[in-house]
Amino acid sequence: MDIKAIIQKLYDTNDASREELLYLLDNIDDDSKKFLIDKAYKTRYKYFKNTVFMRGLIEISSYCKKDCLYCGLRRSNKNAQRYRLDVDDIVECAKRGDELGYKTIVLQGGEDAFYTDEKMIQIIKAIKKELPNNALTLSIGERSYDSYKKLYEAGADRFLLRHESATKSLYESIHNNESFEERIRCLRNLKEIGFQAGAGFMVGLPNQTNEDLVNDLRFIKELEPAMCGIGPFIPHKDTPLRDCSAGTIEKTVILLAITRLLLPKVLLPATTALSSIDSNGRNEGLRAGANVIMPNLSPMSVRKKYSLYNNKAFILDEDAEYRDSIEEKLKEAGFELVVSRGDNPDFI
Ligand code: 5AD
Ligand code: SF4
């Protein structure tokens, strides 16, 4: 097999077989990596030019009933500092975000029983009443079909639920034997209900092989999510994976670029985790096909308590308040920040 021919095929057809993707991941070198990133950037340019969509992230709760082995918010972590935000705090943050130009708000939190359907409907309606033209994204984990449907009907537009890993055995080994099938069912339900649904996975998980990453790539190609969150695994000191090594920026960027080629119109964030492992992570992600950033809008008082992994970027770049400096830095890197909802082109 010829590696550049595989990349060219990905560019021309937005597809490649399992064998080709594995060959690509196993054999990529500096020269072919440049070629891949160039093709990913061209593809991004076709649909989005050099624009970057921005979302304001509000971390609504650090309580979680799950026990994912990699995450600092896991319920067994007795050192975690827990907090939750109620309707008024959340609406206030969302309004501040709107003033700063964030026309999509993302509410993210652990799986916290405090946020019943009734509570979430109350929050969604309160935000939509204040900001009817803005998009609202939820990232609050697994729920029943009926629950998702109620949240959609209340006005939520999008839902992020990373699949984390498309290899059942790897998925279950890092999720305390939670059901892989249930996770996938949730994602399919979200799509069916009409959400712009977001899948996604971590790169560099302990024991993750290139075969596993090919499973992730083939899975997203088949699911065709509107969004896809990809970031490096980063160990957290209060979890069982504390001594494992983190995913690398190089590998994450390669996966971002291949994802852009497989799903040319996908909304693809340069994630905070990527910025956290490398100060140039955001720009490298954007150059490899990412087109979304999600700076933090959470109240200052809770920022340090929402700790999924260690060394999270608390730099200005990840703080929604510093919109102007974010915009300036993006401009220097050749990108243009746009103030809009930033929907997936297939949903407009
Ligand atoms: N390293 C990297 N990403 C993590 N996430 C949770 N814990 C970690 C970690 N230790 C990611 C998961 C989750 C998202 C909200 O954050 O992929 O879906
Ligand atoms: Fe909870 Fe999400 Fe962390 Fe898992 S990854 S422990 S579901 S907050």
Image: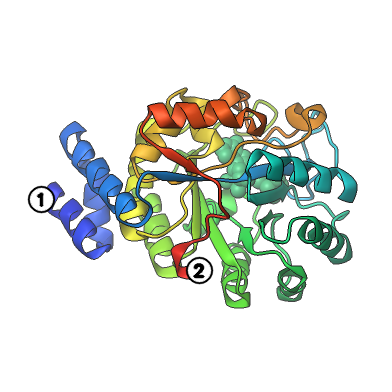
Q: Amino acid at mark 1?
A: Asp
Q: Residue at x 43, y 61 (%)?
A: 220
Q: Residue at x 53, y 29 (%)?
A: 326
- Name the residue beneath numbered marker 2: 348
Does dot 1 land on a helix, a strand or a loop?
loop
Q: Is residue 248 visible?
A: no
Q: Is residue 13 left or right of residue 177?
A: left
Q: Is residue 97 above or below residue 171?
A: above
Q: Residue at x 47, y 57 (%)?
A: 167
Q: Give coordinates of residue 257: x percent, y percent.
A: 33, 46
Q: Are marks 2 and 1 in contact (CB under 8 Å)?
A: no
Kindly indicate the quadrant of the structure image that contains residue 82. top right
Which numbered disc covers residue 2? 1
Q: Is residue 246 left or right of residue 104?
A: left
Kindly indicate the quadrant of the structure image that contains residue 224. bottom left
Query: How many residues crowd mark 1 within 10 Å: few (<14), some (14–19), many (20+)?
Result: few
Q: Residue at x 46, y 26 (%)?
A: 329
Q: Is residue 171 visible?
A: yes
Which numbered disc covers residue 186? none
Q: Give coordinates of residue 228: x percent, y percent.
A: 49, 54
Does dot 2 land on a helix, a strand or a loop?
loop
Q: Is residue 290 left or right of residue 157?
A: left
Q: Is residue 263 above or below residue 54?
A: below
